[in-house]
Image (tube, coloured by chain):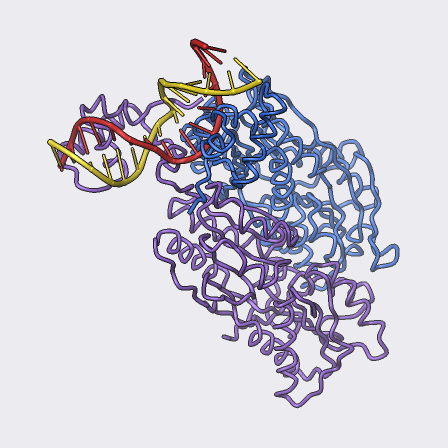
Chain colours: A blue, B purple, C yellow, D red
Amino acid sequence: MAKGVTLRDVALLAGVSSRTVSNVVNGYAPVSEATRARVQQAVDELGYRPNVLARNLAAGRSGQIAVVVPYLDTPYFAELLQGIIRAARVQGYNVLIDQTDGDAEHEKMFLSRGSQQLLFDGVIFSPLGLAQSDLAARDPALPLVVLGERVSDGSFDHIGIDDVTASREATEHLLGLGRRRVAAIGDQPYRTGEAAQLRTRGFRLAHERAGIPVREELIISTPRFNRSDGATAMAHLLDLEEPPDAVFCYSDLVALGAMHTLAARGLRVPEDVAIVGYDDIEDGRYSNPSVTTVSPDKRMIAETAVERLLKRIGSPAPVPGREIRAPHQLITRASTIGQERQPDREHQNVHHG
Amino acid sequence: MAKGVTLRDVALLAGVSSRTVSNVVNGYAPVSEATRARVQQAVDELGYRPNVLARNLAAGRSGQIAVVVPYLDTPYFAELLQGIIRAARVQGYNVLIDQTDGDAEHEKMFLSRGSQQLLFDGVIFSPLGLAQSDLAARDPALPLVVLGERVSDGSFDHIGIDDVTASREATEHLLGLGRRRVAAIGDQPYRTGEAAQLRTRGFRLAHERAGIPVREELIISTPRFNRSDGATAMAHLLDLEEPPDAVFCYSDLVALGAMHTLAARGLRVPEDVAIVGYDDIEDGRYSNPSVTTVSPDKRMIAETAVERLLKRIGSPAPVPGREIRAPHQLITRASTIGQERQPDREHQNVHHG
DNA sequence: ATGAAAGCGCTAACAA
DNA sequence: TTGTTAGCGCTTTCAT
């Protein structure tokens, strides 16, 4: 299986000790230029490649980080993951991906087991089923970076956009268009629905500031943030006596699902109902119509998450947890402002948030 | 960091040798019921967890498999990955995910390096940039399962659907609807475009059998299979003197992109142009209209891939490579047959392929 | 600046 | 059935 060229082979050929070879390979410590060259040549000649497993065992680390997300096939996470994998690889780290399906037990397991087993050195975690308290109860030695809406308790880093502000802006955009019966799809008024609740707060805030009363019957709860939830909720809204003339959806998938129902009922977007989504996934750019959306800076989130996690891993002393706000924008597209320019072109107006 | 309860600690407490503990933990070999119980108790008492790294180093394996895909954020791959991760986890294997962006060099690297380093024990590979010849030139000791359209040369397993047949059926569906100017978007008439070429073959075959001439100007090549390719190609088709009345798209993303352009131009699907896609990604089920598509059995593909790979990994003697055909279906939806039933329901007619 | 040698925690060949 | 022990390939402390 393995080629089997070991450090010792190199050492023998170069006529030095394995210690020196190790130093050369890792770029450690003082090695004279002469020996370094000799060792390097032996390495090349033998085609030596360090055995990662052995290295990690000796070093007491795994060289891997875990990324735990609720769903892998959700475009938002897929896009985020891509960025994380890239950033980690640059630092010589491998990424272990795990999908929890939002199951709290599964998520909890990840915060305890695994680090002991030296399977990974740290975790980037996007919790769904887990409440804030579970997060606090974790193995405190496990370097952790949390994505999404939980708030840091000081023992880990948290990266996320300002959901309340973003949601307020999205709703204000709708109200600014003259819509007065604005609905919200995606509220989750229970223990683990923090993300949703923040968005609902922004939704209410926009109404408050505009002096327009919130119509409670237009706030729809959904179990998840996917297409079918959006489709179902929209159908419900349309069956009301006074259906909405705009909808703020808590994810682009929800928006896509809602638009599906609207089209099926023969309603036009945005003429009859304007739609705003959340996440800025690629799907929303090519849907009919394309979706106005809250766009978090995913790249920044991914890179910062990796950077912070590696910092934690590398530091012997506990690193104080930081709250990190990622920037976001409201990108207006056809689902609220209609076809404005050349349809085949990329058309988006950006409001900085 | 690690709790530090080792095999020896357990052995000491149980009053047996580490060998015996190892046997108990791994369920190996003969252990008397009495000692087994004693050891188990010691394990529980100490909260012992085997150190995976050490185990793998000693056993000469990594306990991980790599999955190499061109793009992570492509829904088709994301959905497939999910199945692979699940299946692998059940067998106690971790999954390392890598994205190549279709870069041939990157892909090639994966076939040589890494196995030596004991980073992974085998690879499930979905090549894009890589030609058949590159595949043959790999490290023959690396257990390999290839997904997609390359054909096995006997040294690895290959799993894929029958692209020619699937494409023929998709095209026949369009012709059967009475469409006579059927276009194809996604051909790739160059070295590494095997997948695309098979689909074009099916496209032609359907025309042949129906006695309808293929209009060469309606076969459009695209660099990739994504939305923007579809959007651009569709725009080109619509600018022809005689635009098509139906399009067979080589992926659902292409179909979605094409539909975006159609909507922008004010054309109706399927009345003006009928659309068939490929892959059956979730997006296509909630798009407006929903997309008729070739649906590969992703679950079967994922599970079989893992099963075959682990079989290879576990076998000391080389396992002869197999060509495995996964089943597929043509799922007809609104993009070809219009809104048939209740719009909020799942509506799909299945043709077994 | 470099060498010698003791592990990292586990598996498995060899004995008993 | 169970114990002894020699590694797996590397890092790293302690010498030199």
- Quadrant for residue A308, please give it: top right
Residue displayed at 27% across by 24% down: B8
| Outermost residue toward the bottom in this view | B211
Quadrant of image for the N terminus of chain B: top left
| Outermost residue toward the right in this view | A341
Q: Where residue B319 sits in the image (x, y, percent)?
A: 38, 60
Drawn side of residue A139 relative to residue C14, left or right? right
The residue nearer to you, when weighing C2 against B218, is: C2
The residue nearer to you, when weighing B65 against B75, is: B65
Q: Where residue A96 sits in the image (x, y, percent)?
A: 51, 39
Vertical comparison of A107 with B225: above or below: above
Q: Is residue B337 visible?
A: yes
Q: Where residue B75 sits in the image (x, y, percent)?
A: 60, 55
Vertical comparison of A238 with A318: above or below: below
Q: Is residue A133 visible?
A: no
Q: Where residue B156 sits in the image (x, y, percent)?
A: 46, 61
Drawn side of residue B138 relative to residue B73, left or right? left
Residue displayed at 71% across by 59% down: B227
Drawn side of residue B207 relative to residue A153, left or right? right
Residue displayed at 49% across by 52% down: B123
Count all numbered tags in the image, as a single digit: 0
- Quadrant for residue B277, please give it: bottom right
The residue nearer to you, when weighing A311 against C7, is: C7
